[in-house]
Amino acid sequence: IISTLKNKYAKDSRVAIFNITASSSFNSIIIKGEVESSVAKSELFDSLKSQSVSFIDSVVVLETKFGKNNWGIVHLSVANMRSQPEQSAELGSQTLLGTIIKIWKTDGGWSFIQTPDKYLGWMENESFTKVSTTGAKKWASSEKIIVTVLFDLVYSSDSEQSEPISDVVAGDVLQIIEQNNKMSKVKFPDG
């Protein structure tokens, strides 16, 4: 049953969460792990009950535990996504400045996040600014500028002689405040 539902809800574990295990303890089966939504959990438990399986529920529904209001916006030019919450873990993917991410859970200074293209991974909390659903919508609807050169710098004023604030790379997205022929005044997700 678990295998069938994992195939249905998380065929590719890089883009969906259905981490369930079953173990026996005395006269009961303990079903534990985590799923994205209550729909997956309900279907799992309904299937087990239909087979007259007696079990103990130790399944966490991440959507319920962490809420639907858990969002972030990447504020580094490139943020790494790792397979585990540690620097030495395998690099799974990267995401760019200005990307809105879904936060599923946290572990110390790390968050398990999902990007708009559905990829999952662990990201350091220092890589993004946490926002509410309202904050994510406000960022999404604001006027933006997209970096189209491979590499550039953002300066503290409208002169390339001023102090650099940050690097940016192709694909980074910033909120545009004002624009002239020479430079644009921009705002980062962290303000």
Image: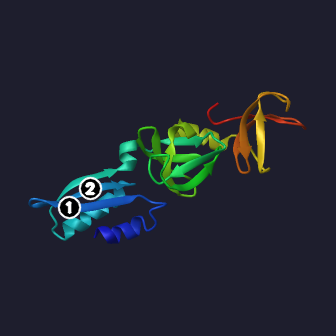
The C terminus lies in which quarter of the figure? top right
* Residue lying furthest front: 88
* Residue lying furthest left: 27
Q: Is residue 149 left or right of residue 96?
A: right
Residue 14: horizontal and vertical position, in percent? 48, 61
Q: Are marks 1 and 2 in contact (CB under 8 Å)?
A: yes
Residue 92: horizontal and vertical position, in percent? 53, 57
Residue at 62%, 39% in the rendered image? 75
Which of discs 1 and 2 lies nearer the camera? The answer is: 1
For numbered disc 2, what is the local secondary structure?
Answer: strand
What amino acid is found at the position of numbered circle 2 in the picture? Answer: Lys
Residue 84: horizontal and vertical position, in percent? 44, 51
The N terminus lies in which quarter of the figure? bottom left
Residue at 9%, 61% in the rendered image? 27
Report the Cα–Cα distance between label 1 and label 2. 8 Å
What amino acid is found at the position of numbered circle 1 in the picture? Answer: Ser
50 is higher (above) or lower (below) than 154: below
Residue that badge 1 annotates: 23
Numbered circle sitting on residue 149: none
For numbered disc 1, what is the local secondary structure?
Answer: strand
**Which tag, 1 or 2, sits closer to the chain's start?**
1
Tell me if mark 2 has few (under 14), some (14-19) or many (20+) residues whose alpha carbon lies within 10 angstroms of its own: some
Residue that badge 2 annotates: 32
Residue 99: horizontal and vertical position, in percent? 62, 47
Q: Which quadrant of the figure has residue 188?
A: top right
Residue at 87%, 35% in the rendered image? 180
- Residue 129 appears in the figure: no
Q: Which quadrant of the figure has residue 19?
A: bottom left
